Image (cartoon, helix red, strand yellow):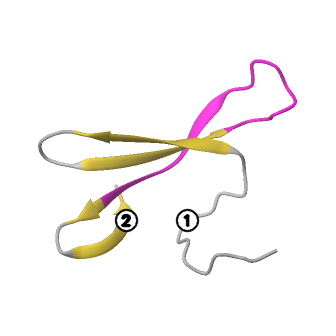
Amino acid sequence: MTVDPHPRFYAGRRGDVLVSRDERQVRADDGVVSGVMVPGGGVSAAGSFVPRAGDPGLFPA
């Protein structure tokens, strides 16, 4: 298995990323589930990130 050397955020849990945008900014919110084998398990925020103009990458929101 090849490991990607570029991630800057890793929660070690399963979840998804919700990306939203408006006229002023783009934002990525990382949500993780409390358990994949438990029906109705909750989702919590693991991190939120935004890009900066002229600076590559994402930064904590």
Query: Up-down: is 23 above or below 59?
Result: above
Q: Pointers 2 and 1 in contact (CB under 8 A)?
A: yes
Q: Callout 1: 10 Å neighbours few (<14), some, many (20+)?
A: few
**Amino acid type, label 1:** Phe
- Ranked by sequence position, the earlier of labels 2 and 1 is 1
**Amino acid type, label 2:** Leu
Which residue occupies 74% across, 36% down? 34
| Magenta region, residue range | 33-50
Percent x, y of residue 42: 68, 27
Judged left or right of residue 49, residue 32 is right
Query: Up-down: is 19 above or below 40?
Result: below
SS class, disc 2: strand
Which residue occupies 71% across, 45% down? 14
Which residue occupies 29% across, 62% down? 51
* Residue on which disc 2 sits: 58
Percent x, y of residue 27: 33, 48
* Residue on which disc 1 sits: 9
SS class, disc 1: loop
Q: Callout 2: 10 Å neighbours few (<14), some, many (20+)?
A: some
Query: Up-down: is 24 above or below 38?
Result: below
Which residue occupies 82% across, 74% down? 1
